[in-house]
Amino acid sequence: MEKKIKVLLCDDMPYICEYFETILNSKDNIEVVGTANDSERCFELFVKKKPDVVLLDMQMETEDEGIQLMDRLLNENPQAKIIILTIHEDDELIFRAFSGGACDYILKSSKTNEILDAVIKAYDGDSSLNPCIAKKIINQCAQIQKQHYQAMSFLHSVALLTASEYKILRLIYEGFTYSEIAQQRFVEEVTIRTQVNKILKKFNANNMKQLIKQLQDIKLFEMNF
């Protein structure tokens, strides 16, 4: 008798679990061994049932609960085959899912044959990314690389700032106006504007609004330095 692929379904919407359970159980060599609607129940069943493949909702209690739960599952069993389920095609979340150890990623709106194929390929260790998802991951990698180079360039410019210029830039980043900064530093506003012009030259930026937006994009002041 052919061994059945044991599948665990985890989604916070019961009807989604029921829908996928019906599809998967229609295949002779697939058996749904449990369903869960929250992360704790999912982990409990994972340990108890030892499924071959887990279909895991990316967004359950929180937006990325599935990704966080995936860490727990893989710590429990590093060989687990986890397919992330979602209704969104978000590039960042897709990248996080695969970086975290997911072997595949399918939309809840996928066709029946696509769902069944994904489970079988995951079990066989033959999961392959469809071109759309592969492109998203490549784009995300490129974006990270671009942000890295940009961050290094900005860090170089930060190193050129005087202590006074650095404090002024940080206050502007935090949302203070030139007038408010002048009051805090007990100087005239024109003095602040003069220093702002020096800051812009060191960053080779056209205006402060544009510079602040770029610094926010790479979260420069959230870095530990």
Image (cartoon, helix red, strand yellow):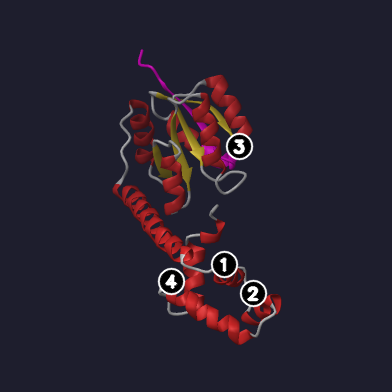
Q: Earlier in the sequence, mark 2 or mark 1?
A: 1
Question: Residue 176 — which label?
Answer: 2
Q: What SS does tag 2 mark?
A: loop
Q: Mark 1 is on which residue type?
A: Ala
- Return the residue at label 1: 163
Q: Earlier in the sequence, mark 3 or mark 4?
A: 3
Q: Residue at x 59, y 33 (%)?
A: 36
Cα distance between the residues tagged 3 and 1:
53 Å
Q: Residues within 10 Å of mark 2 (few under 14, many from 20)?
A: some
Q: Residue at x 30, y 31 (%)?
A: 126
- Return the residue at label 3: 37
Q: Mark 4 is on which residue type?
A: Phe
Pointer 3 and pointer 4: residues touching (CB < 8 Å)?
no
Cα distance between the residues tagged 1 and 4:
15 Å
4 vs 2, front mark: 4
Q: Mark 3 is on which residue type?
A: Asn
